[in-house]
Amino acid sequence: MNEIIETILSKETFAVVGASTNTDKFGYKVWRTLREHGKTAYAVNPNATEIDSETIYSTLADLPTVPDVVVSVVPPTATETLPAQMSAQSIGYLWIQPGAESAKAVADAEVAGIKTVFGGACIMVELRRG
């Protein structure tokens, strides 16, 4: 396991951008898996209001606290909006799930000093390994 993955998995507070109310979708599964591993996981999705009786927030800026890590489970074009939002809140870690990857998002995150996991690593798999 690489150093950034280890560091991210040691963090406590996550925002799952693209969290879904549909239990069959990865946005739900990632959010649920983080919680099952004792993490604080906030759901972010402007198209829903509640997930398992928990509030879903429209944007990262709406969260009640600044997360340590943002996990992207959205299309690549939406992932590309995250580095600027994260930089504005000084969020230092971004995990881009398979299918959400964008070279532009990775490059923008690097310029902003955001440490990023991308290229096929799944946070659910890594949590289970850890």
Image (tube, rainbow, N blue to C red):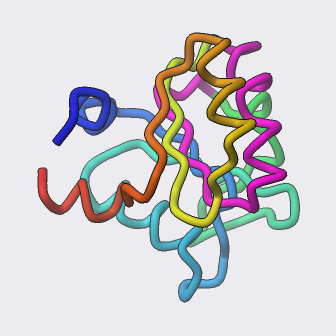
Q: Residue furthest left?
A: 130
Q: Position of residue 118 (x, y in %)?
A: 48, 46
Q: Which stretch is magenta?
A: 65-89
The quadrant in which residue 89 appears is top right
The residue at 46%/72% (across/down) is: 29
User: Does 69 lie within the magenta span?
Assistant: yes
Q: Residue furthest bottom?
A: 24
Reply above or below: 25 against 11: below
- The answer to which of 13 and 102 lies nearer the viewer is 102
Does residue 91 appear to the left or right of 12 in the view shown? right
Q: Position of residue 2 (x, y in %)?
A: 21, 35
The quadrant in which residue 107 appears is top right
Does residue 126 appear to the left or right of 86 in the view shown? left
The residue at 81%/50% (across/down) is: 78
Reply above or below: 29 against 18: below
- The answer to which of 32 and 79 lies nearer the viewer is 79
Q: Position of residue 114 (x, y in %)?
A: 55, 19
Does residue 60 appear to the left or right of 27 in the view shown? right
The N terminus is located in which quarter? top left
Reply above or below: 125 against 8: below
Q: Position of residue 130 (x, y in %)?
A: 12, 50
The residue at 66%/76% (across/down) is: 21
The residue at 69%/34% (across/down) is: 63
| Number of callouts | 0
User: Does 106 lie within the magenta span?
Assistant: no
